[in-house]
Image: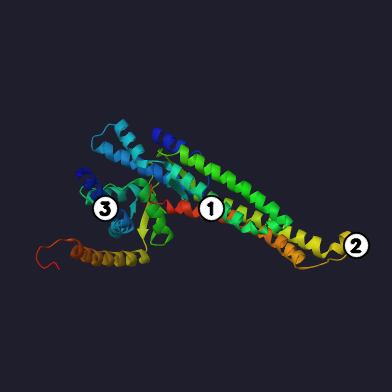
Amino acid sequence: METGGEFLSDSVSGDLIRGNIDTIILCVLMAQDHYGYEIIKAIRHRSDDEYELKEPTLYASLRRLEKQKMIQSYWGDETQGGRRKYYRLTEQGKVLYQQNLLAWKSARNLIDRLIAYQEEGTE
Amino acid sequence: MNDLERYVNRRFAKFKHNKEIQELRDEVLVNLQARIDDEMAQGKPYQAAFDLAVESLGNVDLLIEGHQEVARNRFRRGAAQLAVLYSLIPWVITIPLRFFHSGVLANTGWTLVLVITGVVYLVLLWLTRSDETTRVINVRKLRNVTKVVWVLWGIYVILSTCFTLGTWFASDIWFHRSIQMTGPYVFASFVVSVVLPFVSVFIPLYFVRVQRLVQEQEGFV
């Protein structure tokens, strides 16, 4: 039973993160332009090593966001090693990020109220 | 060319060398290199860092746009089940048309298709119960195949309609006697022979439905 419970909560939090991965990537790009591995690293760092973004998810998300014109890619001018592909937020992307952030906050408040069991005051 | 570049090239070798794939390959390569450098900076030996990077990349097939991973057997069973359904409908439609010569032919043909798809479905049900492997489906290719099937179907319908109308209404050219609609049966027979080819629309529709089946698998693997 216990392992089943653990599995469920793992998948719930995994699904929650996956469902918001585009916004999380937009958030990383708000500060500055990044290339792929830097995004993975930034997300790992911000989650205190608790969440590691998988590369297939990263590429799928970047491609989706670029198609929606939320981000733009450009090749860096590194002289050593291969050239890196950087991503920059567009104005549209910044707007989308703010919208998604607001949507997340209101959903979170609502879910908080619905999901937390309170002995007193629960009807 | 270092180990990593050789590895990445090998994994990308089977894909068409267009600009999109080339850029993806370059991007994957520098990101893997960055990951390896990062791990080594934290004290990992090269081989361990390399293995870790390769593992993080996973299946390169899935990085390519339009590739979708599906549960192999679930997908096969689903596609076979749809094939049964999509041959059952035209089979039922053509049963009442057995009153007419062309209807007998068509209904016999669809019976044959139904039996074949039915047998395939049953065999798959029996064989592939507990295998959990996945396969990658190229959605773009499937879309192109569907397009070709639609075009072929269109050509078939146009040709067969022309042929039917030609044999009926231009009969004075071929047979030196003009068309004779001697009663409702002859008229119905004419209508049936014009409409029958359109029943085969279930073949291209099947391909459209299979595309949706692939999309439905997204996120379930």
Q: Is residue B15 visible?
A: no
Q: Amino acid at mark 1?
A: Leu
Please give the label number shown on residue B126.
none
**Cα gap from disc 3 to disc 1, whole angstroms:** 36 Å
The image quadrant where one finds the N terminus of chain B is top left
Say few, some or many: other residues with alpha carbon within 10 Å of mark 1 (under 14 / 14 to 19 / 20 or more).
some
Check the residue under mark 2 and report the chain it is in.
B
Find out whether the residues at labels 2 and 1 contact each other: C-beta distance under 8 Å. Answer: no
Check the residue under mark 1 and report the chain it is in.
B
With A110 as the anchor, is B129 left or right in this view? right
Q: Position of residue A53 (x, y in %)?
A: 30, 48
**Where does label 3 land, which residue?**
A12
**Cα gap from disc 2 to disc 1, whole angstroms:** 45 Å
Q: Is residue B196 visible?
A: yes
Find out whether the residues at labels 3 and 2 contact each other: C-beta distance under 8 Å. Answer: no
Residue at (27, 31) in percent of width and height: B45
Secondary element at image label 3: helix
Tag count = 3
Q: Are marks 3 and 2 on the same chain?
A: no
Residue at (74, 62) in percent of width and height: B189
Residue nearest the observer in this picture, A56 or B87: B87
Q: Position of residue B111 (x, y in %)?
A: 62, 49
Secondary element at image label 1: helix
Please give the label number shown on residue B176.
2
Secondary element at image label 2: loop
Residue B94, placed above or below residue B25: below
Please give the label number shown on residue B85.
1
